[in-house]
Amino acid sequence: MANVTFEAADSTLYAYLAGEIDHDSAQLLRLAVDAQIDARMPGTLILDFSGVGFMDSSGVGLILGRLRRMRAAGGKLCIRHPPAQIEKILQIAQIEVLEAKG
């Protein structure tokens, strides 16, 4: 099971993901992240994967959906600290990792 905690600074929303991202947990994460996007309307969403030990294709869907949502609002999405296994999945899915500073 995965979880997410949030931190906001200026127009940036940090989402710290942890655990295993599979079909069921990706749905819960999507709802939590979208609620924070709606509430805060950030210019940048940073998904931090440093606490994620496993991710399947459901995680790719989670990322792409949030990317579309942020772009539609004129914002951007950055992925930070993806473990090697997740970085490989992102490469296969042709998702560009935009590394946020800090």
Image: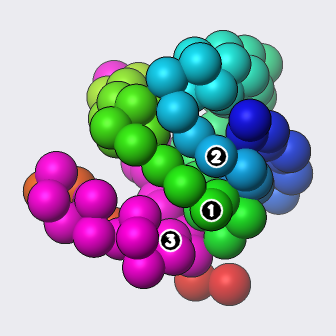
Q: Nearer the viewer, residue 38 or 50?
A: 50
x then y, percent, for residue 34: 63, 20
Disc 1: CA contacts within 10 A as few (<14), some (14-19) or many (>=20): some
Stretch in magenta: 71-93
In the depicted structure, whether residue 54 falls above or below residue 35: below
Q: Which residue is mark 2?
A: 20
Type of residue at label 2? Glu
Disc 3: CA contacts within 10 A as few (<14), some (14-19) or many (>=20): many
Quadrant into which the N terminus falls: top right
Quadrant in which residue 40 is drawn: top right
Q: Which residue is mark 3?
A: 82
Q: How far is disc 1 from disc 2 in space, using C-alphas?
A: 6 Å
Q: Is residue 7 left or right of residue 19?
A: right
Under tag 2, what secondary structure? strand
Under tag 3, what secondary structure? loop
Q: How far is disc 3 from disc 2 in space, using C-alphas?
A: 13 Å
Type of residue at label 1? Gly
Disc 2: CA contacts within 10 A as few (<14), some (14-19) or many (>=20): some
